[in-house]
């Protein structure tokens, strides 16, 4: 039987849980749907990720408002993907921060990515008509961006760790609490999406840099919050292993279809039951095949190309 396209048949609402890993630090997880977070400054808030639509974002803000009524000064976007950024208008933030490559990617392929992600994951796009347009960062950086949280709260450091899940991912690091928001560079008990990735760099230098912060709590892009050094190490190791298996299997294949079948077979026993595994794999293998055959930057995903790759590999 043909598998339904991407996550188009995944229509059951996920249950969300709001966790408070430290005083003034919030993480909303949702059984493998994209995670979001917030960090309190002395007299303002920093929000991390914007969800797919303003209506979806407003539901998160209602929960956050049960804990704090501080105004939102910063909205931080970990990367350009539509389900992370298109809810931005709901936050009314003074400043929208992203890596400089993220801004370039929104300009280059933001429209196509919006159409692609909407077709792949329609459930995440609550009231899609509420999206006013593309989200444009108003502050960008290349290496580091530091936000003084005020009082004795210390800094929130936004850092670039190299190319990974996309060309412009950032992590948000709270040194005083040793808490990291890693965006999609690390997943904890959720499958990886690598359709816009740089697998070789991500699996080596980029994850080395992420690990070098020495986080003791880590909020990944999807999945559970990792508490304690062992869980953080396990989340990073899981991410690295997923990439390493892909590199090994795709590298050993002589056709794209063989690459998909080998990779599926190798990953399925460990990761097959995790959120979005079947959804992501055709796009992941297609991108890695390109990467290993000299295509430097990921090709743009369009709704049409998504379908063609799905039909070739998943049916
Ligand atoms: Zn992403």
Image (cartoon, rainbow, N blue to C red):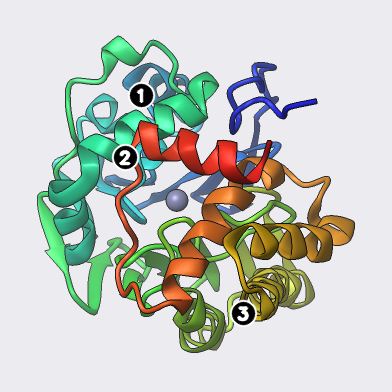
Q: Is residue 44 above or below residue 161?
A: above
Q: Secondary structure at mark 1?
A: loop
Whole-percent x and y of residue 110? 22, 42
Which residue in the structure is indicated by mark 1?
53
Q: Is disc 1 surrounded by few (<14), some (14 to 19) or many (20+) residues within 10 Å? A: many
Q: Secondary structure at mark 2?
A: helix
Could you say which is closer to the camera, residue 45 or residue 57?
57
Any atom of ligand 1 within 8 Å of the CB at mark 2? no
Of badges 3 and 2, the one in the foreground is 3
- Are circles 1 and 3 on residues that touch, CB within 8 Å? no
In this view, which residue lies farthest toward the front? 254
Which residue in the structure is indicated by mark 2?
113
The earlier-in-sequence mark between 1 and 3 is: 1
Could you say which is closer to the camera, residue 211 or residue 282?
282
Q: What's the distance in space between the residues labelled 2 and 1, CA to CA? A: 14 Å
Q: Is disc 3 surrounded by few (<14), some (14 to 19) or many (20+) residues within 10 Å? A: some
Q: Which residue is located at x 51 percent, y 58 percent?
A: 286
Q: What's the distance in space between the residues labelled 3 and 2, CA to CA? A: 27 Å
Any atom of ligand 1 within 8 Å of the CB at mark 3? no
Task: Determine which quarter of the picture holds residue 262.
Answer: bottom right
Task: Determine which quarter of the picture holds residue 44.
Answer: top left
Q: Is residue 253 visible?
A: yes
Q: Is disc 2 surrounded by few (<14), some (14 to 19) or many (20+) residues within 10 Å? A: many
Q: What's the distance in space between the residues labelled 1 and 3, CA to CA? A: 38 Å
Whole-percent x and y of residue 137? 15, 49
Q: Is residue 137 visible?
A: no
């Amino acid at each position: 039987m043909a598998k339904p396209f991407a996550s188009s048949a995944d229509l059951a609402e996920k249950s969300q849980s709001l966790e408070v890993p430290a005083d003034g630090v919030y993480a909303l997880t949702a059984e493998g749907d994209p995670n979001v977070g917030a960090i309190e400054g002395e007299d303002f808030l920093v929000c991390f990720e914007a969800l797919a639509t303003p209506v979806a974002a407003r539901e998160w803000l209602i929960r956050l408002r049960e804990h704090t009524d501080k105004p939102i000064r910063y909205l931080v976007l970990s990367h350009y993907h539509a389900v992370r950024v298109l809810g931005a208008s709901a936050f009314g933030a003074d400043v929208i921060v992203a890596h400089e490559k993220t801004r370039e990617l929104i300009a280059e392929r933001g429209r196509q990515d919006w159409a692609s992600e909407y077709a792949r994951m329609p459930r995440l796009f609550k009231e899609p008509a509420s999206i006013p347009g593309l989200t444009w960062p108003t502050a960008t950086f290349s290496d580091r961006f530091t936000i003084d949280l005020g009082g004795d709260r210390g800094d929130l450091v936004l850092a670039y760790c190299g190319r990974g899940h996309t060309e412009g991912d950032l992590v948000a690091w709270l040194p005083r609490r040793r808490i990291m928001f890693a965006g999609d560079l690390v997943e904890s008990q959720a499958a990886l999406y690598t359709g816009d990735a740089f697998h070789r760099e991500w699996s080596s230098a980029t994850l080395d840099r992420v690990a070098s912060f020495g986080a003791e709590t880590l909020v990944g892009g999807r999945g559970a919050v990792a508490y304690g050094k062992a869980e953080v190490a396990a989340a990073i190791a899981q991410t690295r292993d997923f990439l390493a298996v892909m590199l090994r299997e795709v590298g050993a294949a002589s056709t794209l279809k063989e690459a998909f079948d080998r990779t599926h077979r190798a990953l399925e026993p460990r990761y097959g039951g995790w959120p979005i595994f079947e959804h992501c794999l055709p796009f992941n293998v297609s991108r890695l095949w390109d990467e290993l055959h000299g295509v430097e930057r990921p090709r743009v995903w369009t709704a049409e190309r998504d379908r063609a790759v799905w039909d070739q590999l998943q049916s």
